Image (tube, rainbow, N blue to C red):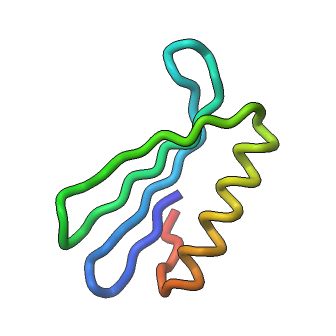
Amino acid sequence: MRYVRDDGRYYVVERTEDLFGNQVVLVAHGGRTPPRVRSVPVGSAEEADAVIADIDKRRTAHGYERVE
């Protein structure tokens, strides 16, 4: 999912697997600053969905609009 704001800031969230086959949620954000990427390890697909739902709630509350 991708979130954007009018001031050019963005967030990208994706559920994927790391090199060892473990579920992770990748979060990238940037805009006025150089992009940053972090990996959030999760134990299951359900936990990943919960992390993504929490991120969605916070991004929406901070004025971001989902575009994908």
27 left or right of 16 in image: left
Give the residue at x 77% y 33%.
44
State the image coordinates of residue 20 (x, y, percent, origin top left).
56, 12
Residue depicted at 46% across the width and 50% down the height: 27
Q: Residue furthest right?
A: 46
- Residue at x 68%, y 36% (from the top left corner): 42
Q: Nearer the viewer, residue 40 or 67?
A: 40
Q: Tell me where residue 29 sits by quadrant.
A: bottom left
In the image, residue 16 above or below residue 62: above
Examine the image and state in which quarter residue 59 appears.
Answer: bottom right
Image position of 19 (left or right of 44): left
Q: Is 11 left or right of 52, judged from the image as shown?
A: left
Camera-side residue of 41 and 27: 41
11 versus 16 height, above or below: below
- Residue 68 vs 5, above or below: the answer is above
Task: Specify the farthest residue to the top.
Answer: 20
Image position of 6 (left or right of 25): left
How many numbered badges does the structure rendering display? 0
| Residue 26 picture location, percent across and down | 49, 43
Residue at coordinates 50% horizontally, 15% vertically from top-left? 19
